[in-house]
Amino acid sequence: MATPAARAFRRLEGLFCVYKPAGVPWKLVRDGIETKLLKGLDALPSLPIPEQTRFLPPPGGDNLTPKVLSAVCVPALSKHRLVTGPEFRHIRVGVGHRLDTFSSGVLVLGVGNGNKALNDLYHTRVTRDYTLEGEFGTATDDFSHMGRVVERSTYDHITQDKLERVLAMLQGANQKALLTYANVDMQSQEAYEMAVQGSLGPDGKSPPILMSLRCIRFQPPNFTLEVQCLNETQKYLRKVVHEIGLELRSTAICKGVRRTRDGTFTLQDALIRHQWTTAEVMRAVKKNRPSTRSVISSNRSTPVPTDKEVRSSYETQSCDRLTPPRSHKQDLMS
Amino acid sequence: MASSCVQLCIRHRLVLPLKTVALTVCTQARRCHTFIRPRRPPDVSGMQAKYQQRPCICFYSNIISKQENKESKQLIHLNDDVSSNESPTSLDQDAATRLPALEEISDEEAASLTPYPSIPPASASLREYVDQSETLVKLVQLGVNLWKLEQRPNVGSMLLRLVFDKDVAPRLLFLKSIGVDDSRLGYVVTHNPLVLTEDLENLQARVNYLKSKKFTSENVASMVSRAPYILNFSVKRLDNRLGFYQQQLGLNAANTRNIVARLPRLLCGSLEPVKENLKVCEIELGFKANEIQHMVLAVPKILTANKRKLTQIFDFLHNTMKVPHHLIAKFPQVFNNKFLRIKERHLFLQYLERAHYDPDQSSYVSLERLTSSPDYTFCTEVALATLEDFYVFQKTL
């Protein structure tokens, strides 16, 4: 007979995403979630202790009375919770595309058999969306605001127009890299058909490629970029901010890297810290079952993923729920 | 290991065929409980040395072999008929040929026969022994977490060796007499099983020492309930620690008693981390001596807190939130919180432009309201926003 804990354990299988806070290593997040899931499973009620029959001799001391055994039904303490320990001592929780300690954002985790889908997620060429907060005027050794300052410069000459031009130049260079690493002859029909479907892109390993790059907010010295990229690392994205500063003949540091989308998992689905419980994770896994299936099937059937679907789904959902501060203040005051 | 197992099998079989002797021995030994209760501790043999690489394996076979030896010696003493007990191996061969399993026996003999003991000679878990051992049964009924205890090396064997009436009961009654609640006895034994092997005179001496330092009996009871290891430390060590706290913090006797009664594990752990924490507060964080005294009196946990956490929280409070030293010293409970909680709440208030921590300003937010209130109260009263807004904001950080 399955205990409630065993039934819950079987339901904990699939992919879900959490919002990783900045400053916390991804491994701590994964360990914390595993501990919370195990604690939740341990708290579920267990089956009552089975009984066993024991035959005891009568307590009398004399040899003359005939020895008759008495049958006694006692609980089998070897099955008691305090003796056997918790039913589940380990859950397999795997991490998808990792986020380094400095960054925050959507972190896809797989639990139980869902870890197999993580493998497919790696091979599927899904893009990720990031929001980069930058600040002009300083250059540091690790490109972030917590590093050692290397250089300071002025930024008064920078206008939004110049920034847009630099971004366009970068995007052009990245598009060229995209086509080069696609390993397809540009003059062929095959390349045309792939481009029409939107599935033209690098296959397998390639250097980081930024598919699109645009500036959302520009208030010197601060600016915010929105990036869609492939095969990237967060340090590369901070380096991109640094290089933008250099292109504009100034310097820039990155104050925050925030992943807003990983494949089909967006900020809306991400669980924040107080939601890292067994019930919430089960709900999230159930909700994400269709997208998990699409990840697995897309990896199995076609060699190139349906990036067009991903992009269209992104456009229909709104990633940035909070409007810029000005209008939000008006909402509050009204 | 194989040879010892074979030896043990031989010894088990020794008990069963000697039916006439078994009857007389039966009345003395208590059959429903384990007969693995030797009165002397097993000495370290070569086999135990082999098992030392795996501390979780409790080595019980030595215990059984000693007990069997004693019982077989008893049997030899009681019945002179059994003369061939000098060489166990020759007896075994004779027993095997004389008494096949299908021999008919009377009802009385059948009733007195115990089933072949299903207790393994050595095991990595107490599960196999719990049904046969009176001590283990009573401990489980008290609420002791045997699973946690068997992970510790040697504790499982120690528990099996204890006799409930002679070893465990007097100590539990002693704990009860100090004032420890019945429901806490399980907790105390789970966290400190070695209290069951301490001398009763030593335990009494330590309790008398604490009472002589003017701790009330309720205080002593609560200290033992919350820090079970306290009774295992010698009087000299307890004295040393009390003296250290009084001298280092510059507190009078009443205040020292106060913090030790509230956080009894101060007397249990090492003093090095406490010294380091005090140095951190003084040098790195820059608190004055009287501020440190006040903070420790309010929150003694600061003495055993993680240094990195203390520094991280203080750095954020002082350098980012610009809260001065005297305000932090007034509310040291802020160090009890998780760093991320303080950070998220401060950034939320900053976003809503309500981050005023100076008492002179209007709409001043005290550190207590910032950190100690639950999420709902914080959102509705301090930030004047909804809980959903706060959760959505957390996803933008």
Image (spheres, rainbow, N blue to C red):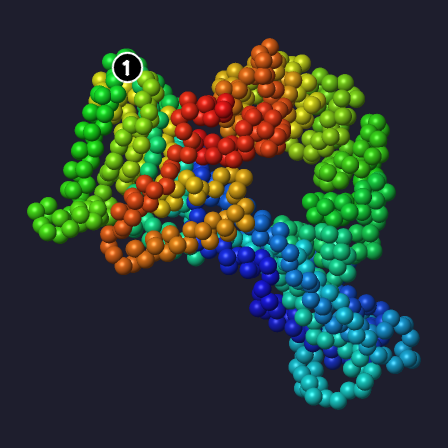
Q: In the displayed orientation, state which residue is furthest to the top.
A: B360
Q: Quadrant of the C terminus of chain B?
A: top left
Q: Is residue B274 visible?
A: no
| Residue at x-position 44% and y-position 37% | A20
Q: Nearer the viewer, residue A75 or A246?
A: A246
Residue visible at 78% across and 21% down in the picture: B253
Q: How many marks?
A: 1
In the image, A24: left or right of B92?
A: left
Label 1 SS: loop
Three-letter code, disc 1: Tyr
Q: Is residue B172 visible?
A: yes
A188 on left or right of A144: left
Q: Position of residue A199 (x, y in %)?
A: 22, 48
Q: Name the residue at 70% across, 48% down.
A: B190
Q: Is residue A202 above or below residue B103?
A: above
| Of the pair B129 and A244, the residue shown nearer to us | A244
Q: Quadrant of the N terminus of chain B?
A: bottom right
Q: Which residue is depicted at the point 20% across and 49% down?
A: A197
The residue carrying mark 1 is A155
Q: Position of residue A253 (x, y in %)?
A: 33, 23
> Which corner quadrant of the image does residue B2 belong to?
bottom right
> In the rendered image, which quarter is residue B91 located in?
bottom right
